[in-house]
Image (cartoon, helix red, strand yellow):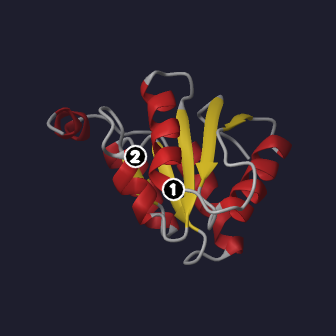
């Protein structure tokens, strides 16, 4: 898999733990640096705590982009978007994910482990990591956020 980004961070809640581990393994096999910010088990945790870890790391530019996984992806996206400079999106299919990078310069991809088929996850992730931001009129709009 090709990636525009060299440093990725990932986190999940308990519902997304197994999918986080699956994604992490795929990214490592693709020779891309990934930092796992937890959790370390599938024991119940509060997703806002982990969304905050990833969003702060991306905001501080310690990672280029982040990946968050929970049951639906929505809770993580809502939480991450509370951090200034973060544009977290739920990648529910290839087209939505591609447009989120092209038009919104999304910097965190949120995935729903209970709503997205495993076979589609890698396709969605690959699109997120290889799609360039188009800039132009989209840059002007992002500045208004």
Measuring from the top left, give residue 7's x and y in whole percent: 64, 29
Q: Quadrant of residue 63?
A: top right
Mark 1 packing: few (<14 Cα in 10 Å), some, or many (20+)? few
Find residue 80 and name its label.
Answer: 2
Whether residue 121 is situated above or below residue 65 in the rendered picture: below
| Dot 2: element | helix
**Residue beneath the point at 77% across and 59% down:** 22
- Asked if residue 91 is positioned above or below residue 126 in the image, the reply reads below
Mark 2 or mark 1: which is in front?
Answer: 1
Spot the residue most to the left.
144
Closer to the chain start, of discs 2 and 1, is: 1
Expressed as whole percent of the image width and height from the top left, the position of residue 17 reads: 69, 60
Q: Give the quarter of the image for residue 142.
A: top left
Residue topped by disc 1 = 46
Count of marks placed on residues: 2
Element at label 1: loop
Residue 71: give x, y in percent of width and height. 54, 70
Compared to residue 4, the image places residue 72 above or below, namely: below
Give me the residue at 52% from left, 38% from top: 54
Observer-nearest residue: 53 or 106?
Answer: 53
Tell whether label 1 touches label 2 (CB within 8 Å): no
Residue at screen point 60% across, 54% down: 12
17 shown above or below 48: below
For mark 2, does the 10 Å Cα neighbourhood hold few (<14), some (14 to 19), or many (20 or more) residues? many
């Amino acid at each position: 898999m090709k990636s525009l980004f060299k440093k990725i961070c990932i986190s999940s809640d308990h519902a997304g733990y197994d999918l986080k581990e699956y994604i992490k393994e795929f990214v490592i096999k693709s020779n891309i640096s990934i930092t796992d910010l937890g959790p370390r088990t599938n024991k119940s945790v509060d997703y806002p705590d982990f969304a905050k870890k990833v969003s702060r790391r991306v905001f501080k530019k310690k990672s280029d982009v982040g990946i968050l996984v929970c049951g639906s992806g929505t809770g993580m996206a809502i939480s991450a978007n509370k951090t200034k400079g973060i544009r977290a999106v739920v990648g529910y299919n290839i087209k939505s994910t591609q447009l989120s990078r092209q038009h919104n310069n999304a910097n965190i991809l949120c995935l729903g482990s209970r709503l997205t088929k495993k076979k589609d996850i890698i396709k969605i992730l690959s699109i997120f990591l290889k799609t360039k931001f188009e800039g132009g009129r989209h840059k002007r709009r992002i500045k208004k956020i």
